[in-house]
Image (cartoon, rainbow, N blue to C red):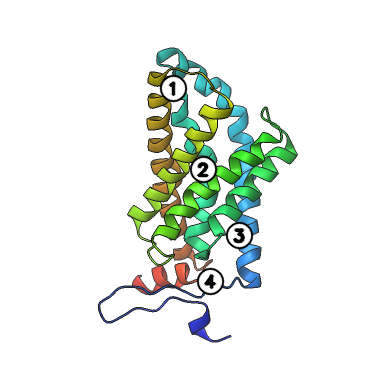
Amino acid sequence: MHESTTTATTTPSGRRTRPNPRWRVVDIVVASVIGVASGLIFVAWNVAYNPLSAPLEVLLPGLQALLGGGWLFAGVLAGLIIRKPGAALYGELVAAAVSALVGNQWGASTLLSGLVQGLGAELVFALFLYANWRAYVAVLAGAGAGVALAVNDLINYYAGASLTFAIIYTVCAVVSGAVLAGLLSYLAARGLARTGALDRFASGREVRARV
């Protein structure tokens, strides 16, 4: 396979053009691994959520959304590494499926959450035409997933909540998504790239070329 079919190119002005959107076998495999590994982390986060969220709810109802980013990073991380349309949605859905299959307090509705949250991150990457993978885009993708989480939760779990609660919950979800899912995923992707584990991806070669 020619290099031009798998990597983005750089114009004389320094702007990166959009890479080939076709998925390779290695893209599917690695995205699946990211999703499964993230799903197992979700399982641990599911267990930790109740004891961690309880004091936040007592302090100020809605603050529990600060923990939401712990379920949002799979899509952002997959998107940053694979750099193909659908990667963020796929990664988040696989992670949600693993969480649901292992078992959690939300059951099959976890799949709906994964779908909505994955779309939140995916839409941000799409807005940048899958050609910009800088830190601020990752943060925005995490924030987009946070917005999606808040909307989904307010409709399905907090129907009838006050406007004040909805605002606090949404702001906290966005902040959590931006930091935990966005910034930390960006740093994690770069850390993996520096090890050489992502050399078959543009995301890995780009970082290694700067080292």
First in sequence: mark 4 vs mark 1: 4
Name the residue beneath numbered marker 4. Answer: 21
The numbered mark at residue 72 is: 2
Tell me the SS state at disc 2: loop
Which kind of residue does numbered mark 1 sit on? Answer: Gly
Looking at the picture, tell me which residue is in the foreground, 185 or 148.
148
The numbered mark at residue 62 is: 1
First in sequence: mark 3 vs mark 4: 4
> In which quadrant of the rendered image does the C terminus lie?
bottom left
> In which quadrant of the rendered image does the N terminus lie?
bottom right
Which kind of residue does numbered mark 2 sit on? Answer: Leu
* Spot occupied by residue 96 in the image (x, y as percentages of width and height): 64, 43
Q: Residue at x 64, y 65 (%)?
A: 28
How far apart are labels 1 and 3 at the CA level? 32 Å
First in sequence: mark 4 vs mark 2: 4
The numbered mark at residue 150 is: none
Which kind of residue does numbered mark 4 sit on? Answer: Pro
Quick check: 29 above or below 167? below
